Image (cartoon, rainbow, N blue to C red):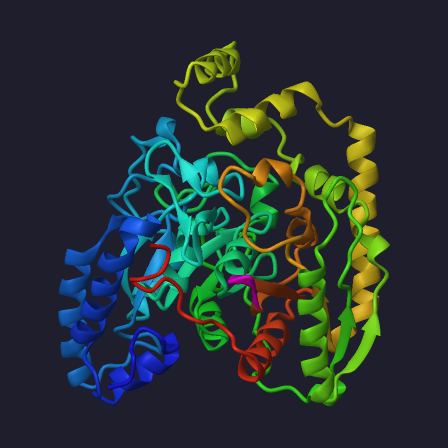
Amino acid sequence: MKDLLTLPGVELGRLLKKKEISPVELLQQHILRTEEINGQLNAIVVKRFEQAQLRAEEAEKEILKGIDLGPFHGVPFTCKEVIANAGVPHSLGAQHRLNIIPEKDATALTRMKQGGAILIGITNVPEMGFWIECNNLIYGRTNNPHDLKRTSGGSSGGEGAIIAAGGSPIGLGSDAGGSIRIPSLYCGIFGHKPSSRTVPLTGHLPLTADKGAYPFFTSLHHHTSIGPMARSAQDLRPMLDIISGPDQIDYMVYKKKLGPKQFDWKQVKVVVCPNPKINLANKVGLSMQTAIHQAAAVLNDLGCQLEELDGSLFKHAMGIWEAIFKQAGDENLNSLFGLQAGSGLLKELALKTTGQGHYTMPGLVACVSERAKPMPAWQMAQLQSEANLLKNRLKRKLGPNGILLIPPFTSPAVKHNHTFRQPFDFAYCGIFNALGLPATSVPMGKENGLPLGIQIVANHHNDALTIAAAEVLEAETDGWQIALSTKQNG
């Protein structure tokens, strides 16, 4: 029998449709794998095994009757905790949200279930989904399956870890500043941040699934995307097909075809930027630059036209991201953390010095920074203007058939508690949230046992092209390799 823990989700779906395996058997293998590894990873923080088993039995009956719900009918999947799941605390890893229990699933989660996929668990996030270290005071810290002493990234760090280790073939993440792409890099899997306004944010802050209306409106909504994460690039497009399109609640989303599945690579321009220069961020390591050159060489062999891009074009990336996300009006980080009034922040800082408190340090530091240095209106307007200029320059450079190869981060996964040394390095991803462009994370080998990777960017609504390029690179390289054997890491 084929190893069911290493096959793409779409291949598992094909085996299920041909009745070569059963949904019950497939689910059991993934549950056994999760039970084997999750104690070391702490990736799945809410198990849905009993519900999944009942759904697998139903799926088996459906398949035997010839019912076809889609490419993932009967396939297990996981979902990030910030994406609402009915009846389960929608905490975002924050203690002040533990009593928030959604009555409805998020739209993206509903669509995956309606497509026959079987939810087996909800995965860990940093507090409020903020930070690249996946840790909170409710569920604890998630470890990287390639090295348990290192972070799995954030904020979709639980998703990255469980998929990388074979516990789940596919999953739902979300991305406001690299939260799909950085965990995908750190854990050595594939992930896709869709073009803005492609996938409904309903059931993900700031848009609740319960009320069917905005509890508040912030620029966070414009630049945050729910997207697919998977052990194979083959699963990214089918997942995006399922979760994208209007839902009559998130009125920012409009219907748009994803485009062709096949491309003439001799007609594709590949713009290479291995060493962007971003103010405040660290420099890109040589191993990450090498991964870019390796990907470019593969695409060049297929006939793609290669061009270089001046890395200084991105020098204001951090400021642009900050300006775009500070269009939030009366809603800001302090209010999202429940610290919008009085001296609550000072009290929490005092408690933190004694090892107590209700918040993690990254969240408190961000709230302090926001209060200490608000961005003046003139500077915000200037940076927003620069964002438009940058987007237009990239639009002209890439055109309708161009992709950009650029590092998603400066280094492979870092050790736990070392992310404070790289507070602005997420800007290598975050700039494309600010610009609303699609970006696909692709593993490209390893260095000292840690995954390397790239991100592939294209013009708005050219998601099909970045995903197709990821599929080509997967076919020509090692792609994802299952992490964390029972003997690994002692």
Residue drawn at x 20%, y 64% is 32
User: Does 298 appear in magenta?
Assistant: no
Residue drawn at x 44%, y 35% is 127
Residue drawn at x 52%, y 56% is 186
**Rendering coords of residue 23 (x, y %):** 20, 75
State how many labels appear: 0
Query: Could you say which is closer to the camera, residue 331 or residue 28?
Result: 28
**Rendering coords of residue 151 (x, y %):** 48, 47
Q: In this view, does 3 lie to the left or right of 418?
A: left
Q: Determine which quarter of the picture holds residue 484.
A: bottom left
Q: What stretch is highlighted in magenta?
A: 446-451
Q: In this view, does 113 lie to the left or right of 483?
A: left
Q: Determine which quarter of the picture holds residue 294.
A: bottom right
Looking at the figure, which quarter contains the C terminus?
Answer: bottom left
Q: Is residue 324 above or below residue 47?
A: above
Q: Is residue 31 left or right of residue 395?
A: left
Q: In this view, does 129 lie above or below 305?
A: above
Report if residue 459 is visible in the image: no
Residue drawn at x 66%, y 60% is 437
Query: Could you say which is closer to the camera, residue 59 or residue 247?
Result: 59
User: Does 448 appear in magenta?
Assistant: yes
